[in-house]
Image: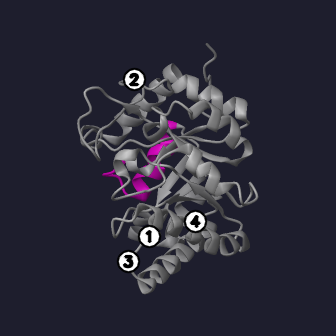
Amino acid sequence: MEQLESFERLCLNQATTQRWNLREAVEGCVRAGIPWIGLWRNKIAEIGLKGSRQLVRDAGLRVSSMIAGGYFPTVSAAERQKRLDENRRAIEEAAELEAEVLVLVGGGIPDRDIDCARKCVAEGIEQLVPYAKSYGVKLGIEPLHPMYAAERSVVVTLAQANDLAKSYRPDEVGVVVDVFHVWWDPDLYHQIALAGERILGFHVSDWVVPFSHFLLGRGMMGDGVIELRRIRKALDAAGYQGPIEVEIFNQAIWDQPGDEVLAVIKERYLEHL
């Protein structure tokens, strides 16, 4: 089966090397020859926006995306406005860092009304689109695994994300495919094909059996059951040729030296993607 032969699409999501600050992550990518980096807002805040931009630019790295916006559902109109304002700040930061995509996590259920929460997500995206467009930033809706529906996102399938995105132009709103969240879905490959040019990001890790931890249970590629190369080839066929972003939440991996983690990532990327 066809496999990747170079690292030109390989991207380090900062979550994978959690102990590294932005400077350390940037320098690690340069040493490892990884050309892309996915940025987290909390890591940017540690150094500051201008300093973060300079670090990335000086290193010659490209920014795949910035994480995260969204979290729209709330119990009050005042809190909802605060979150919209925070999303607008995130859009401004993404533009400053030359990240084409702001990843949106829908948000959980504040008051036991899942239908209302999903309506809030749709309304929040609608309100953000003109602002994001004015900054040249695309909004990437990332569906999360259903086990996160209560706390993190009521958008739990790629079909839902596609439905939310289809009201907008592909250069305004699209979807982010994270294998950890969608690998199980019997409709996955159909939905990837439907998404087509709306695919704005591709995140990889693995689902390790037995599953160990709600938040920190992601495995290194090849350590679990996900058909990584099959999913990658489906995205290729749908037209996605962007970065392949390694995003792993795992304490054991975080505790390892970052350079060693990047070396393993490169090996597994070629072997399994």
Q: Position of residue 212 (x, y in %)?
A: 23, 35
Left or right for 200, reference 220: right
Q: In the image, which is nearer the foreground, mark 2 or mark 4?
A: 4
Judged from the image, the secondary structure of the residue bearing numbered disc 4 is helix
Residue neighbourhood size for the residue with mark 2, other residues' Cα within 10 Å, grouped as few (<14), some (14–19), many (≥20): some
Q: Can residue 265 be spotted in the picture?
A: yes
Q: Which mark is residue 75?
A: 3
Q: What secondary structure predominates along the stretch shown in magenta?
A: helix
Q: Which mark is residue 122?
A: 4
Vertical position of residue 241 compared to residue 127: above or below: above
Mark 1 or mark 2, earlier in chain: 1
Judged from the image, the secondary structure of the residue bearing numbered disc 3 is loop
Contact (Cβ within 8 Å) of mark 2 with mark 4: no
Figure coloring: one colour
Residue neighbourhood size for the residue with mark 1, other residues' Cα within 10 Å, grouped as few (<14), some (14–19), many (≥20): many
Per the image, the residue denoted by label 1 is: 73
Three-letter amino acid code at disc 3?
A: Val
Q: CA distance from mark 3 to mark 1?
A: 7 Å
Residue at 32% from the left image edge and 28% from the top image edge: 208
The magenta segment: 17-32
Counting the numbered discs, the total is 4
Per the image, the residue denoted by label 2 is: 225
